[in-house]
Image: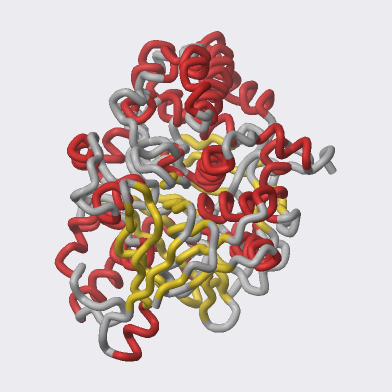
Amino acid sequence: MENRDFDIVIIGSGMGALTVGSLLSQFGNKKVLLLEQHFKAGGFTHVFKREGKFLWDVGIHYVGDMAPNSPLRRIFDMVTGGKVDWAPMPEIFEKFVYPDFSFSVRNDPKLYQEDLIHSFPHESDSIRRYFQDVRKVSSWHGRHMMLKALPPFLDTFGAAIDLIGASSALITTGEYLDSNFKDPKLKAVLCSQWGDYGLPPHISSFAIHSLIVSHYLHGGFYPVGGSGQIAQAVQEILKEHGGRIALSRQVSEILLKDGKAVGVRVINKRKSEESGKIEEEIYYADHIVSNAGAYNTYLKLLPESVPISFRQNLDSFSKAYPLISNVTLYLGLKDDPRRLGFQGENHWIYSSFDHDKNFSDGYKWTEGGKIPGVYLSFPSLKDPKAHAHTAEIIAFCDYRAFEEWKNQTWKERDDKYVRKKKELIDRLLLYVEERYPGFSQLIEYSELSTPLTTEHFTRHQRGTIYGLASVPERFKEAKSPWFSPKTPVENLTLTGSDAASPGLSGAMMGGFAAFTRVSGGISILQLLRKTGPAR
């Protein structure tokens, strides 16, 4: 089957795809088709339900900067047509829990700074300088991302602006901390959110660290009704302009003619399962946008005959730096967790102040080693429309621990795999129970997802959740040109986190950068002017 009904074809339906699809529909008057290989739209923004009442998000655990009329909220409302509401988390929205010390983060940067100085008065000057540096480097990161979207004739001008602040950004988080602080406990506290970008201090870029810290300086927010509202809102916008999201469509190849992207070859998974044979479809369009990530786009979807000068370097980069995978324990609760003192805040629980060790031990614990740390979250306490209480426990792990089952069918893996999951469930619950006695008694339902689950539904390499690593080299365009909405193939654009940065807001900004490229240079500021003043 061949289809030529759409102006734009987008591979995937995650936040980067939803963003560029919505904007091209609204402000480019384009008929846009999103092709999603999962049977649910939204990528990491989708939700699922069990027992008819327990609802969990799979990737959107909290988002910063979503206060009414904030710049990011205005941008997000533009993408969703203002149809997604955001509930603020409590004043204390994060707790960093260590063996003999805990620290509560309040949703005001002045109070956060004061609390740090109160706990570490001997480092007061360095703490004040840290908050200044975080803001400065975060601003550089924003400029760096948006300058990548400039039309070609402005690239030279943009490169000159991009140099401002780059020296501080292009070092590791560990290098910055070691140069500015002495207290190892304080260094650990400042890095406690490293799970939000998935890399420990010795290899993570201070740019990505600063971006995440800055993003949450005013607290966290959660989508009312769950993150599934995001894809629903965008799907309505697409339909209004003649577009849609097609599910169970696995893109197998980007098609080219005379060196230009002209379409995609697709496997209709639902029809293939019904017929017992491969059922292919071909969609042609004026422009192809990929939300499949740089690795999949350049190394899997484009034919090897297409000349991509950095293919080998991209492959080497993906092998040189760790791809972050995880297990998630989804819990349905039979009682209100507020009975144990939880109020909806996140808990980052660690076994050590040494985050580099916590990270390396994350590759051992699934085989019997000590659990180095977990992230504990309560979606039902964040969502005012939740019908039943839920919790999530997330722990980083090594894909190799599950690799022997990678070729077995989803939901049909053998008893050894089932026993492995049961063992990990018990150990994770015990780890939290040791810190919060009585927690296990709340459990009514439990289900564990592994990196194989992520790989099956997203086709991300080795079940990674954050795309390619946010190391300093990521932000050196001469060395890593694949981290950009621009591609060497005419009429092909990259969107999502690999075009910007990890997380929902990063993927959304990747979508804006992609829109700017495809639309011929329309910027965020121009769009904000078109949509009128803040509400």
Tell how many labels.
Answer: 0
Q: 366 or 498: which is nearer to us?
A: 498
Q: Farthest residue to the top: give it.
A: 125
Residue 149 x, y percent position in the rendering:
51, 32
Q: Is 277 situated left or right of 193 in this image?
A: left
Is 111 above or below relative to 271?
Answer: above
Any part of residue 343 in sight:
no
Q: Residue at x 38, y 36 (%)?
A: 483
In percent of width and height, residue 46 lies at 53, 64
Whether residue 375 sits left or right of residue 372 in the image: it is right
Can you say which quadrant of the picture contains the N terminus? bottom left
At which x and y percent is residue 265?
34, 66
Image quadrant holding the C terminus, namely top right
Image spot of residue 15 (x, y percent)? 53, 53
Identify the residue at image location x=50%, y=37%.
102
Residue at image x 34%, y 18%? 175
- Looking at this view, name the residue that lies furthest to the bottom: 275
Q: Is residue 312 visible?
A: yes
Classify 347 as above or below 403: above
> Outermost residue, left direction?
404
Res 390 → quadrant: bottom right
